[in-house]
Image (cartoon, rainbow, N blue to C red):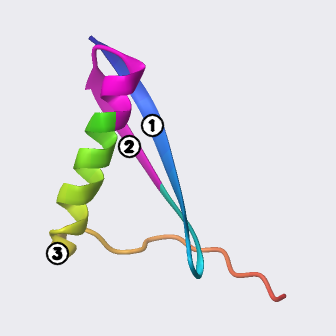
Amino acid sequence: MASYKVTLKSDVKLGTFYWVANVTAASEDEAINTAENLFLETLNSSEEWDFTDYDAEKL
């Protein structure tokens, strides 16, 4: 088992969403899977997350 910092990126209709998670897994593929599952669990529990940082640029 090793520690991985996984960055997931999803291009959605109105922008791009990134999810960064530190996970422990036996392989890179397992780390990606674990991060995806952690994202879904966290997203389903909206009480656990809030945006804490932002960057806004005038276009």
Looking at the image, is mark 1 or mark 3 earlier in the sequence?
Answer: 1
Numbered disc 2: secondary structure = strand
Q: Report crowding for label 3: few under 14, some 14 to 19, many 20 or more residues within 10 A (C-alpha).
A: few
The residue drawn where x is 15% and y is 69% is 45
Residue holding disc 3: 47
The residue drawn where x is 77% and y is 82% is 57
Location of the N terminus by quadrant is top left
Q: Report crowding for label 1: few under 14, some 14 to 19, many 20 or more residues within 10 A (C-alpha).
A: some
The residue drawn where x is 45% and y is 37% is 6
Q: Position of residue 13 (x, y in %)?
A: 56, 79
Q: In front here: 9 or 52?
A: 9
The residue drawn where x is 25% and y is 66% is 43
* Outermost residue toward the bottom in this view: 58
Give the image quarter of residue 27: top left
* Outermost residue toward the right in this view: 59
- Are the residues at dot 1 and dot 2 in contact (C-beta closer than 8 Å)? yes
* Outermost residue toward the front in this view: 13
Numbered disc 3: secondary structure = helix
Residue holding disc 2: 21
- Are the residues at dot 2 and dot 3 in contact (C-beta closer than 8 Å)? no
Q: In front here: 54 or 20?
A: 20
Above or below for 42 versus 3:
below
Q: Position of residue 50 (x, y in %)?
A: 33, 74
Amino acid type of the residue that numbered disc 2 sits on in the rendered structure: Ala
- Are the residues at dot 1 and dot 3 in contact (C-beta closer than 8 Å)? no
Lateral position of residue 55 relative to residue 32, left or right: right
Residue holding disc 1: 6
Looking at the image, is mark 2 or mark 3 earlier in the sequence?
Answer: 2
What range is drawn magenta here? 19-32
Lateral position of residue 19 relative to residue 16, left or right: left
Task: State the separation of the CA atoms marked 1 and 3.
Answer: 23 Å
Q: Position of residue 48 (x, y in %)?
A: 20, 67
